[in-house]
Image (spheres, rainbow, N blue to C red):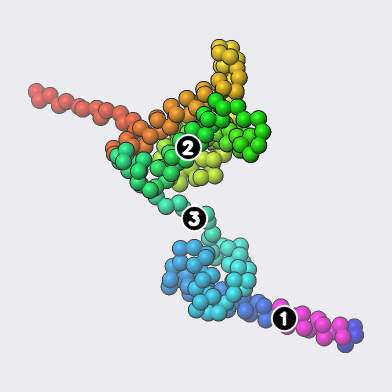
Amino acid sequence: MSDERKERRKQRLKDRLEVETRQAEIQEIIENILENSQPPDVRTIIELLEKNYDISREEAIPVLRKMEFATKLTLQEPLPEETIMPKTPREYFLKKNYFSIEFWVSTSIILLVLIFVLIDVTEGFFFYFRYVVVSFFMLFLSGWSLTSVMFPSLDDNMRFLERAATAIGLSLFVVIIDGIFLNYTFRFNPVSIGVSLIIITLICMTISIIFRLKLGRDGYILKKKEQVIEVVEK
């Protein structure tokens, strides 16, 4: 083996030892941070390393992954913050929160769909805008309103992506069932399918509002009556 190859090999070994030593130092610092500061997430750990120990993100991430692989650190998806259910219609419709935003956005889209269904647009910007709005309404919003009826509360049992996927699946189901119903009863055309889906969505929105207000006020939707056992003294 030539001297040049030996030197390259020694240099690679030296570099690897330096990296391992540096990672061991960073791991020890991270363990001290976890023990003393108890940071809530990885982002906070990295910010503490950059601010207090001058350790870059590029150096910290491989060590965190190595600790997770060695089961010294457990990384998980952050839990959503608890959403307080509204107790009054004023809190639901007028207070700035998730529920009022959902209601007014849904109502605006329904009004746009109703306008585009009743007014025939054949060209221009509004022609393409019409397809975008109507497609979103048919393939997402109709199922989203039904999902809100089935799962009115917002908690970690159903996250946003799961709720969105469920809404897409239910939208397809509602559109197919509605189309079959109109085909055998009323006349099947864009106006009938649009108006019928709007009615279904409004009904679902109304039911979900009632459910959520009852959840916020009473803490439950349906509750069985407690059985009262009468004790008869002999």
Q: Amino acid at mark 1?
A: Asp
Is the residue 109 above or below the residue 59 in the image? above
Q: Residue furthest top?
A: 185
Q: At 46% across and 63% down in the image, what residue appears?
A: 40
Earlier along the polypeptide chain: callout 3 or callout 1? 1
Earlier along the polypeptide chain: callout 1 or callout 2? 1
| Snapshot quadrant of residue 66 | bottom right
Earlier along the polypeptide chain: callout 3 or callout 2? 3
Within 10 angstroms of label 1, few (less than 14), some, or many (20 or more) residues? few
Q: Nearer the viewer, residue 111 or 155?
A: 111
Circle 3 sits on which residue? 78
Q: Bounds of the magenta span?
A: 4-16
Q: Which mark is residue 113?
A: none
Asked whether the beta carbons under mark 3 and mark 1 sit within 8 Å of each other, the answer is no
Q: Residue 231, image x and y in percent?
A: 15, 26
Q: Nearer the viewer, residue 223 or 215?
A: 215
Q: At 40% across and 42% down in the image, what residue appears?
A: 100
Circle 2 sits on which residue? 108
Q: Disc 3 to disc 2, how far (Cα)?
A: 32 Å
Quarter in which the N terminus is drawn: bottom right
Q: Residue furthest left?
A: 234
Q: Nearer the viewer, residue 18 or 143?
A: 143
Helix, strand or loop at label 1? It is helix
Quarter in which the C terminus is drawn: top left
Q: Which is closer to the viewer, label 3 or label 2?
A: 2
Circle 1 sits on which residue? 15
Q: Residue 229, image x and y in percent?
A: 20, 27
- Residue 115 lies in the magenta-colored region: no
Q: At 36% across and 40% down in the image, what residue appears?
A: 93
